[in-house]
Image (cartoon, helix red, strand yellow):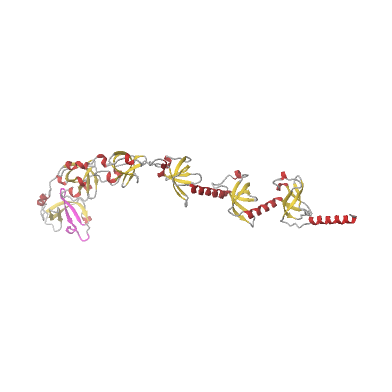
Amino acid sequence: MSTVEETTSSSSSLSDLYAQSLRVITEGQIVKGRIIDITSQDVVVDIGFKSEGSISKAEFSDIQTLAVGDEVEVYVENVEDEQGMVILSKHKADRQKGWECIINNHKEGDIIDGRPVRKVKGGLMVDIGIEAFMPASLASYKGYANLDSLVGQSLKFLILKISRARKNIVVSHRDYLLREKDAIRQTLIASLTVGERRSGTVKNLTDFGAFIDLGGVDGLLHIGDISWGRIGHPSDILAVGQQLDVVVLSVDRQSNKISLGLKQLLPSPWQHAEERYPVGNKIKGKVVNLVPYGAFVEVEPGIEGLVHISELSWSKRVAHPSELLQVSQEIEAVVLAVDPKNQRLSLGMRQASGDPWASAKDKYQAGAKVVGRVRQLTDYGAFIELEDGLEGMLHNADISWTRKINHPSEVLKKGRMVDVVVLTCEPDNHRITLGMKQLMEDPWPQLVQQFSLHSIVEGTVTKVAGFGLFVEIAKDVEGLMHLSELELGPNEKLDERYRVGSKLRAQVIKLDELERKIGLSNKNLPPEAAPTGS
């Protein structure tokens, strides 16, 4: 080759190299370059431009593995500074590449791997390829986590928000945990079948039962399904943190509610109840509850019988079982009926002591004089207890021959012993009627002779009513002085003119032996004379 040709070829190669060195490079561009030097502070990179660029070693996370000649991608910040140098950044190149990777491959709601790298105000910066922000409140679903303990850990996060304009990403570890927990719960609920046996841990105790953690989902163990016997509170048998086996009673997959049972692991005490408690047998039990309609009696753990209020006493009219019984009291009762299918046991307490009415006809014949205790007072009369389990009725009309009794408390006091006469005895109807006035002769024939019509009497006001006065004209003998038969001034009021205990004269204007009524008047009285019966 001639000298001219060599010169021409050399000039052409230099032109190509120079042209390559002046390739178009713009700010904000990511380009490939080659490391040409590594100093104590910087890494010098040739990107094929008219000058090299230097990058701080702090921007390289893998600085220990780099060597001269290695190829790296860098971000062009400035093509020429005041010294004519190109300004490059490895950190911004990595961030730009990471951002593009995130927005091209992920969206809000996706799960992504990451690692908290440092603590900042309000939360943590998380490396997910680029740095994302996680607020402190989203680090754990159980309150606020110890943020320092999370730094450096490889965790999973849920992408909450991607801001393209600000190139900002917010992530949450808490939402990832909640999603995982829900997924585990749904999987576990889907796997549950009614009747199967599961192991769990007592998580919480309440008045109505216990919540059992089955390994990601909680089920309710109702207090009624803890034991066949009656318990006051779940803490009587269970404790928080206790491991136990339970039976799945029901699963509601729409509401995610699970009902569990513990007593179902043991045979029901009702299985052989008919053999253990035959009808007619006398048994012992403990009163566990009193209700208006009767008493519940526990005969063994898991089996309670009802003593209906009508089966408490042969004759006593019991308004509430608490009149005869109290909770925890030991009693004897007779089995009346057994229904294992519906878990019902009917008991009778009165049958355990025998029927007092069986011999009542012989003991309480009409006309017999007996002594009894006043047990109860009502508007219409008094119940008199003649013996345990047997009582009779003393009506107001049978207390006195002559006195009008509006309420038995006017004459009788509860608990007092009284003499009475048996008027009727009906054992089949469980009914005895009694009388007090029958202990003495009927005074009315004598009264008719003593207080004749138009006779003048003197008496004491015993009661002032809206329609008149009741006046006692002899011991336990009262007459009614109607308002129309009273002397009253034009503006005079009855209760102002006449008071209980005041004395007055009156004339007998009515004497009805059949109805046993005496009518009185103090109008137009004749001149004062010795009253009748004085």
Answer left or right for 126 relative to 516. right
Seen from this angle, which residue lies furthest right? Answer: 3
Q: Is residue 482 one of those drawn in magenta?
A: yes
Of residue 391 and residue 408, the one placed in the foreground of this image is: 391
Residue 121: x and y, percent?
62, 49
Stretch in magenta: 467-491
Of residue 254 and residue 168, the one placed in the foreground of this image is: 254
Seen from this angle, which residue lies furthest front? Answer: 1
In which quadrant of the rendered view does residue 107 lie? bottom right
Of residue 270 and residue 43, the one placed in the foreground of this image is: 270
Count of numbered labels shown in the rendering: 0
Q: Is residue 142 one of those drawn in magenta?
A: no
Answer left or right for 304 relative to 24. left
Of residue 121 and residue 41, the one placed in the foreground of this image is: 41
Residue 495: x and y, percent?
22, 55
Residue at x 25% of width, y 39% of height: 353
Residue 69: x and y, percent?
76, 47
Residue 401: x and y, percent?
15, 49
Seen from this angle, which residue lies furthest bottom? Answer: 490
Answer left or right for 81 relative to 285. right
Seen from this angle, which residue lies furthest left? Answer: 449
**Residue 154 visible in the current orientation:** yes
**Residue 386 visible in the current orientation:** no
Answer left or right for 473 relative to 220. left
Quarter that holds the N terminus:
bottom right
